[in-house]
Amino acid sequence: MNKQNNILIKTFLMGLLPLLGGTEAVMTAVFLALICIIISLITRTVYLSGKKYLSAKSLWLFLIVIGLSLTNIFYELLPKVLPFTAEYVNFYFLLAGVTPIVFAGCRKIGNFRFMQLELNFLLIMFVTSTLREFLGQGTFLGWQLIETKLLPFITGSIGAFIILGSLGITLELGIIKTNILSSNSEEKKGGTVSE
């Protein structure tokens, strides 16, 4: 698979834990994604400033400690400082510190790719949670849109896997179609199309 085209799939896999546990409702998902992005920015800054002083092994251990520490700090402080956030902070919040998305941008990746990865994560969290909330509860951002719960099991862990799998397949098919279309276009421009 083309490295340029599979950034969404990578984002998908690297953020799997928050995607499974934090996407039952849109506000929880967006909140968790934003916190992961903030923690990612901090760990990237630490990595870039500390990589010359630490060995590769000790640096990764250091980053995991930072990730876990930051998520614990956010977990404890946010509900106290911003009481409205209490309903969005769950145990998946604590585990976000060891999620690969937090460390993904630390090595061999430019600032643009790093931000692209983080924004893709936010987008995937938003889409997954929107589908899970609407199909499972008939709501969007807590507003009741339809009375019928179309697929109530979608709010459970099995629903998270179904939505993620469906999104992954859709993304993969879209990437394949884009590659086919671009190769056909290049062949036509080069005059190598066989008649």
Image (cartoon, helix red, strand yellow):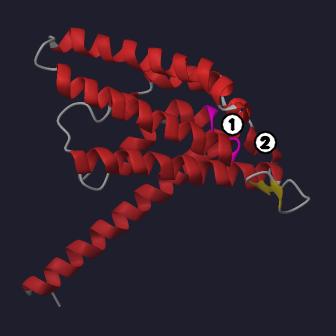
The answer to whether mark 2 and mark 1 are in CB contact below 8 A is: yes
**Residue 191 image point, x, y percent:** 8, 87
Say which amino acid is labelled 1: Ile
Magenta range? 21-25
Q: Main secondary structure of the magenta part?
A: loop
Q: Quadrant of the C terminus?
A: bottom left
Q: Crowdedness of circle 1 by 10 Å Cα count: few (<14), some, many (20+)? A: few
The answer to whether any part of residue 181 appears in the image is: yes
CA distance separating discs 2 and 1: 7 Å
Residue 75 lies in the magenta-colored region:
no
* Nearest to the observer: residue 92 or residue 78: 78
Give the labeled residue for mark 2: 153
Lower position in the chain sequence, tag 2 or tag 1:
2
The answer to whether any part of residue 23 appears in the image is: no
Q: Spot the residue most to the right.
A: 147
Q: Residue at x 61, y 27 (%)?
A: 78
Give the labeled residue for mark 1: 158
Say which amino acid is labelled 2: Phe
**Label 1: element kind:** helix
Whether residue 145 sits left or right of residue 88 in the image: it is right
**Residue 13 image point, x, y percent:** 43, 37
In the rendered image, the vertical position of residue 35 relative to residue 111, given as above or below: above
**Label 2: element kind:** helix
